[in-house]
Structure formats: structure tokens, C-alpha cells
Image (spheres, rainbow, N blue to C red):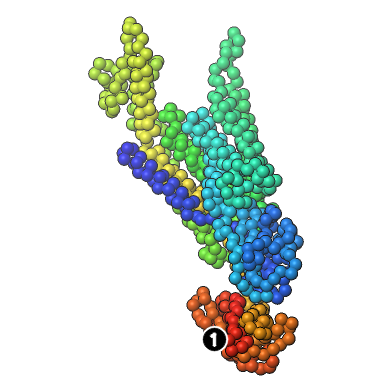
Amino acid sequence: MTQTIAPRVRTLVLLLLAAACALLAGAGPASAHAAVTGSDPGQGAVVQEAPARISLTFSEQVALSDDSLRVLDPDGKRVDTAEPSNVSGTTYAVPLKPGLPDGTYTVAYQVVSADSHPVAGAYTFSIGAPSKTSATVSQQATDDGIVGWLYGFGRYVSYAGFIVMAGGAAFVLACWRRGSGVRPVQRFVVSGWLALTAATLALLLLRGSYTGSGQVADIVDLSLLGQVLETKTGAALVSRLLLLAAAALFISVLFGAYARPSPTTLNDGAAGRQPDSSEDAQEKRDLTFGLAVGGVVVAAGLAASWAMSEHASVGLQASLSMPVDVIHLLAVAAWLGGLGALLVALYRAPADAPVDASAVRRFSRVAFGSVLALIATGTYQSWRQLGSWSAFTDTRYGQLLLAKIALVVVLAGVAWISRRWTGRLVEAVPASAEREMARVGAGADASGDTVGDASGNDPTGTNNDHDADEQPVPEPDDTEPADAERAAQLARQRAARDTARQKRLRDADPNRFGLRRSVLAEAGIAVVLLAVTTVLTQTEPGRTEQEAKAAASSSASASADAGASGALTLNMPFDTGGEDGKGVVTVDVDPARVGDNEMHVYVERPNGRAFDIPEVKVDFTLKAKDIGPLPVVPDHIATGHWSANGVQIPMAGDWQVDVTVRTSDIDEVTVSKNAQIG
């Protein structure tokens, strides 16, 4: 039965790991945690006079560098004149060159939000009238690409390492103290420490490129590392490394002095007196208390290194949110990390020191308390990050949170099954295991070898026909010279026999075997849950996303209202090449929106004096929708003035306005400009 089930559970773990990797790979670039909630000039705005500066307002404070705000003219050249600065609250500005000509300008920004995530984007505004622009801004965010993927993977490993280390140590101290001397459990906890340490060092090296250029070559730039150390995130990572040094000391004591059993019999000189066992027990209790206090302090400090530099440190009620986040992380570690340690104990603990039912019951109580803590802290953090029920379905953060909640519910259901198996698990070894232990005990000599008769039966009367490796291993003849190769072969046979015997002992109890399978399923779901949580911490909170959408909508409405209240004016110089062929044609469209509009055309000489020409006509074309040209022939009203009523604009968009000017029978030219109408 064990041989049949084992491939299935291994397949289950592989499938769940593959699902976690697919989730991380398909998560796409991490959304920014700070969002632009306002700008001056606004996105897509057309201003008549060149502004002295541009300003951006974010949903939270951000960190700036020399090139955080760039303004590019239609030719792609920078027109900002100084480093960006914080003008008030969460508003940042950069000055512009004076007297900028008409055209469309591009504003590109790249900052780091207060919760440590890079924010990048771009928008355009126009002076006088929109125009074509050759300015290009990379559409790949700095947190995208190979550096972004490596940074996200490092975050996943760091979370996993913390959970394994802290949760595994808590399982040993609170649930199964004998586990401090079990080598597989020791390796499990130490692997968590190694993973967290390696991931923290990697994040320090990746951080500069992650928030800057996004280039792989910049990972080894020590100047960027120096800049990272001056940031809040860099300080948090360094603090984490210092706390990991303390954690290493804690682990060495836990698996060193704490794991050594107290002596039960010691000679006290010639009197042969035995030691006071109560003193040994008190010493053990004192050491347990000291490790528990020290472990909680170190684990809380490590959890705080995340809480003080990410989501919890900004936004609403930050002073309350950070300790709540620490409790949340500790509860996750106690539950999932303890679950991993229990799984290792159930599968890898030696037969002579199996994890007992009382330890499983204690962990069940710890896990139940952790779940209650997760529900309380998770509910608070969900309200804080979402702010409304609609954010659950309308934002990416809310959708990921729903997926996380669903996984927690499934995990709790499997944990309930594990509790049922725990209730069936008894302290006594099942009858089959008792027979095996009796056979082993009766058939083992001082060297640990089975003593059997010539027929291959052991002294207990149990036929030794399970496996080939259960046959008695002959001892070399003492009268013959020692054969090193033969002795090594016999040692390997004994090791293989002992391994098979231990495996049979572990699998003898069907209740224990059922518990192993349910705990394995829990661990597999926990892997996927951790992947979802990692992606969730890199996603813009739903409250911030909705605030940004509302601000963008308000800005668009304000722009539309501004457009509805005033005319759009386009000034276009022309030169037909003939006599008196130079001048300026001005087109006014009022109110420059979808539907009926009034149009006025003015023709002036370069010195500003109005003059008449034989003909002027206007065409409107919306190339994006393949509409037009829509011709308009205005009526002559006065010298240099033409007008047309009822000019229909069928839809909003970036319209191309073509004006054909004829100054004689043969001299004619068409000039064009783009304009946002509607």
C-alpha cells in the first residue's frame, strides 16, 4: 500500500509546485503601490501658455532621483532644467525652460513608492495645440524583465525561508521538544535560515537595478548598493541580516545544548550518589523559557523588517498596521512552518524517535490559534487595503485576495481532516509494529546484528521472509584475516536492512500513515498559498487603485468641462510661395466637443494685419477611426474673417485639422495641426 501511495503523493507535490511556479511566472510585472492622483498640466490638457513647471501628485510619498521626472519636447529633447523636488505633501515638481514653443510634450516619471516598490509611467500635454511628437519612453517598467523576476523570486524565497525557520523552531519548542535532536528536523530549520540569508543578500544586490535601470549589469554596481543602503528598504534588509546572526545563535543552542539529554546517572566521587533530577528538569525548563523568549524576539524583529518597509508602513493607521502585520507574519510562520516541520517528522524521523500523538495534538492547537490570529489580522488588513466591497472584484489586489481566501479555506478543510487523523492516532505502537520491535529486540546482538538459526528464523519464531535484506547477515570468521572489502559490503547490507526496518516501523500505523498524507496535502496547498501571498504583496492595493481611477476620471471630467467652456484655437503659419503668400491662419472651434460646433477662420499677414484671400477651406480627419476628411467651406464675413455654423464632430478623438489657403489662381498650400476634440 505504501509503495502505491508514495508515487501519488509525490505527484501531488510536484503538481502543486508547478502551479506555484506558473502563478509566479504568469503574474506579470508588479503593479506600482503608489499611483498618480493628479498632475499640472493634466494628462492630455491643452494650455495656451507654456507652464513654468510640471507637477505630479501621488497617492503616497515617493523617493526621487535626479532623473525621476523628465519632460521631453516634440523632438524628444529634455526641457526640464533642474532636479525634481517635493513642493508639498505628496506633490513633486520639476521646472521647465522658459518660452517653450507650441506642441505636444511628454512627461515621464520613475520613482520609488514609500512601500518600496518602483513606480513608472508617462503622459502628454500640449502647449497651444497638439502636435506630432517623436519623444519615446520605454514601455517596460523597471520591475519587469529578468531583474524584476529575480527580485520577485528572491522575495518568495525570503518569505519561505522565514516561515520554515521560525515555524520549524516553534514546532520543536512548543510541540515536540524531542525533535531538537532529530537530524531531518534540524536540517529543515537550518535550510530555512540559509534560504532567508541568501535571499536577503540577493535582494540587497538586486535592489539598485530593480528600482533603477532594470539592467542585469547594474546588479554588481557597488555605487548603487551604497545608494540602496541609504534607503528605508536597504536599512530593513541590513537589519534582517543582523537579526539572522542572532537567529544563528538561537539555532545553535536549540540543536546543541538543548538537544543534549540531561544525565540520569552520574557518580559523585566515592559515595556514588545520583544527581538531583529536579535540578536537571529545572535547568531544562529555564533553557526552554530562555529560548522561547529569545526566539519570539528574533522572529518578531525579522517580521518587522517586512512590516516597516512595505504595505503596512504607509497608508491608513500605519502605527497600528505594522504590529498587526507582525502578528500576521508570525501566525503564518507558526502554522505553515510548523506544518512543514511536522511533515518532515512524519516522513523522516527515525523509528526509534517517532513523532508522537501528543506532539501532533499540541501542534493542532497551535495551528488553530494561528488560524484565528490570521482571520483577525487578515480582516483588518483587507479593510485597510481595499476600503470597499467593490474592490474585491474591480481591482487586481482584490481578486488575488479572493484567491488567497479560497486557498486558506481549502487549507483549513484539509487541516480538519488532519485533526480527525490526529484523534485516531494512539500513543501505543500497533500490534504489527510491536511484533516487529520484539523481533528486532530479540534478534539483535550487541553489535546490532540479527541472530538467526540455520533456517533463517529468528528466536521469536517469526519467519524472516519479508525481504532479501531481512536475511541474517553472516559475520566474518574471526580466524580468517580481516577482509576490508567484505566488511564494507556487510556494513552496507546492515545499513540497507536497518533503513528498511525503520521505514516499516514508521508505516506500521495506518492512522499515522493517513495523517502523513493529509499533512502532505496541506503542505502542497501552502506552497501555492505562499506564491499568491508573494504576488499580493507586489500588487497595488485596491484602495489606492480605486483612488487613482477616481482621480483620473475627475481629471478627465475637468478637462472635458474646460474644453466645453472655451474654444479650441489653432495657429498655423503658411507660405504659398507667391506674392503676398505668407501669413498666419487661425482656426477657432467652439466649444470643441462632439456634436454642433461653431468655427471661425482668421487670416493675417506676418505683421498681424488682416487681409483677404481668394479661398480658404477646412477638413477634419480622425485617422484612428478612419473618419474623414470632413470638408467645411466657411462663409466670408469680413476682411480676413470666415465663419461656419453647425460643424459636426461625430466622435471624440485626436482630429487632424487641414486648412487649405489659396492666395492666387495658382498659389495654394495646405497646413495641418492635430487637436483633441470631444
The spot of residue 98 in percent (x, y) is 75, 67
The spot of residue 257 in percent (x, y) is 58, 26
Give the mark count. 1
- As shown in the figure, which amino acid type bears the numbered disc 1? Pro
Is 470 left or right of 309, judged from the image as shown? Answer: left
Which residue occupies 56% across, 64% down? 391
Q: Nearer the viewer, residue 233 or 11?
A: 233
Say which residue label 1 marks: 631
Which residue occupies 68% across, 46% down? 227
Q: Nearer the viewer, residue 363 or 423?
A: 363
Is residue 386 among the parts visible in the rendering?
Answer: no
Q: Nearer the viewer, residue 661 or 211?
A: 661
Give the quarter of the figure containing the C terminus.
bottom right
Judged from the image, the secondary structure of the residue bearing numbered disc 1 is: strand
Which residue occupies 71% across, 87% down? 610
The spot of residue 648 in percent (x, y) is 56, 86
